[in-house]
Image (spheres, rainbow, N blue to C red):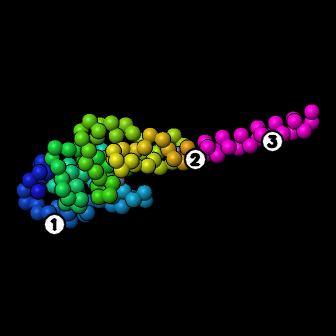
Amino acid sequence: MLSAVKGLSRYHTEKSLEAHLLERSHRAENGCLIIHGYGPRRGTHQKVAGRAWAHIAAYVVLVGGYDPALDVDQTCGAADCIEPTHLRQVSRTEACRSRTQPARCRNGHDRELDPATGRYRRVCRTCNREAQRRWREREAAEVARARAAYGRS
Ligand SMILES: [Zn+2]
Ligand SMILES: [Zn+2]
């Protein structure tokens, strides 16, 4: 399966590649496994082990079942993350779209992945719940006001 990793140094085996990836990465506070590839740029896709993309190499050896026809994407939105549970395969158009999908809603809640599509749910459940609560409070206030007005007349 390593042959599917373009640009990979041909001296690598699955075991040595796995060790290489883990050696070059560190665990971030948010659970991401951030890889340090060649070159000074961080927060972008990283190259390792020759000229291989780290996130693709990680998918092959840490996740398994890599499909070269599909792209590898990080659900956490960090392009230099190789945490296996943050990696998924998506079609190329979907990968482009999901890069524009922020991992948090505009109120800062972690967004939920829809298992059916592998994309974030459009509606934030926490926001939705809070909106419903506000609506119920407004309703209750309205009823109380109406009762009070009725009582006065
Ligand atoms: Zn991550
Ligand atoms: Zn929210």
Residue 120: give its label: none
Q: CA distance from mark 2 to mark 3?
A: 23 Å
Residue 143 colored in magenta in the image: yes
Would you say the beta carbon of the disc 3 residue lies within 8 angstroms of ligand 2? no
**Label 2 sits on residue:** 129
Q: Sequence order check: which comes first, mark 3 or mark 1?
A: 1
Residue at which label 1 appears: 15
Q: Is residue 41 visible?
A: no
Position of the N terminus, as image quadrant, is bottom left
Residue at the spot x=68%, y=43% of the render?
136
The residue stretch that appears in magenta: 130-153
Q: Quadrant of residue 132?
A: top right
Residue type for callout 3: Ala
Say which amino acid is labelled 2: Arg
Of residues 109 and 127, the one drawn nearer to the viewer in this rendering: 127
Element under label 2? helix
Instruction: Name the residue that disc number 3 marks.
Output: 144
Specify the amino acid type for callout 1: Lys
Distance between the alpha carbons at the discs numbered 2 and 1: 46 Å
